[in-house]
Image (cartoon, grey):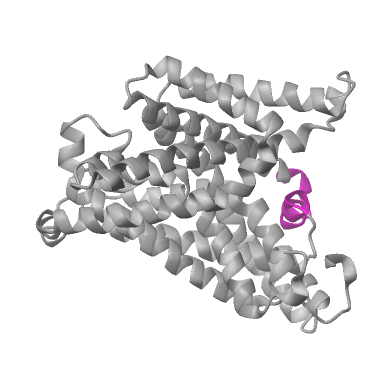
Amino acid sequence: MKKAKRVGSLGAIFGVASVLFGSHAGGGFATGNQETQFYVQYGWTAPLTAILAMLLLTFTMREMIVFYNNNDCKNYKELFTKLWDPYPKLEILWEIYYYLMVIIAVSAVIAGAAAVFKTMGVPYLVAVLLVGFVLLILTIYGALVVSSAAGIMSIIILVCCLLIFLTGINLRSPEISKILTNREFWGANKLTPFILVFTYAGFQSVVIPSLAAASRELICNEKEATWSMVLSFIMNAIALGLAVTMLLGWFSEFKAAGQMTLPTLFVAKHTGSTAIAVAYQVSLLLCLISTGVTCIYGLVNRFEDYKKLMWLKTRQKRRIFTACAIMIVAILLSLTGLSNIVKYGYGYCGYLGIFAIIVPFLTIGIYKNRKFKKENPDYKWHAQRVRDGEDQAGE
């Protein structure tokens, strides 16, 4: 990404759109648990609210990208400090949100991977400890290798999911048509799924550090920022829309079978294709582990030079200590099960995200972005300066 001069507008737009898509359509999405908890269990509103959530998320991220580059921010701390100015200390809301989200995401990875092992006959507690140990070792000794392979594993899991989604929709098209036509609603309160639109966008906003960094290196102006999020909306809406539509048709079956934890795996095993089911199971496990390693590695990097850890004399010792601390908390949380982590962990972080991210960017962010554009009509973003040869920082 640092070779910004060599990246054309279309490549830049696709690159940034893919960062948000990759963050959203990862291991947690592939289990089907997220889609079931936030959309499918409420009935016919699932496809509609899924699309609304992606619209809200991409619109918010568009404002974030514009604000980040207008203010030439270098990291997420600068982003939120300038967003909240003249009350910069409110930036702490993001810090709390981010650390909670990372730990909860790691615990969800452990719980999800352990659930996959459980389907293979491994006791859940043993599976949790095994996955936790593997994540710890990979974080300490092989994080860069795993991170490099994460893209390939994500592509494999997305291909498997696409096959399952299309096959699953085809097998249950009469049931899906009936639910949508009759507008079957299964929740107690018809407003709940629409409130969850904000919650879902709230916890998915954890992508901000990666998305902001990518936009700085690739996106040259507001127009490109807008088109990158339009493309990302299309990509995410199609993937999420297919997922919830398929699960909608199978909901009564996997609920009756007690398979609410890994509903997509249940569908995969009932598509009639053993190859798809096995490929999905293996790639899901690998994708979950790679996601976990990436999350832990990012937080370890954040604290490896933390002043209060300097009693540990070497950076490697501080990294190991931080990784162990994260893993202990994540393993304890994972014992509550994937469904509880998604429902309560992601849910409450989503509520925090509404007030720490969604509302501020859609109010303060929009106001400051419009004011900046009016006062600085000729301002060039970092990537544009690099392309024009005016800023060599990206070389």
The answer to which quarter of the image holds residue 384 is bottom right
Q: Is residue 336 above or below residue 55?
A: above
Q: Indicate whether residue 210 is drawn in magenta.
A: no
Q: Which residues are magenta?
A: 75-90
Q: Is residue 42 visible?
A: yes
Query: Position of 275 compared to 76: left or right?
Result: left
Provide residue 182's location: percent of width, then percent of height.
10, 58
Q: Which residue is rendered at x = 64% and y = 58% of the image?
A: 211
Q: Is residue 316 above or below residue 235?
A: above
Q: Is residue 82 above or below residue 108?
A: below
Q: Which residue is rendered at x = 34% and y = 57% of the image?
A: 162
Query: Position of 169 compared to 122: left or right?
Result: left
Q: Quadrant of the N terminus?
A: bottom right
Q: Which residue is rendered at x = 72% and y = 57% of the image?
A: 83
Provide residue 208's location: percent of width, then percent of height.
63, 53
Q: Quadrant of the C terminus?
A: bottom right
The answer to which quarter of the image holds residue 278 is top left
Provide residue 42's location: percent of width, then percent of height.
25, 46
Q: How many numbered marks does the figure carry?
A: 0
Provide residue 377's location: percent of width, then percent of height.
77, 83
Q: Is residue 46 visible?
A: no
Query: Position of 56 compared to 327: left or right?
Result: left
Chief SS of the magenta region = helix
Q: Indicate whether residue 85 is drawn in magenta.
A: yes
Q: Viewer-proximal residue, 188 or 306?
A: 306
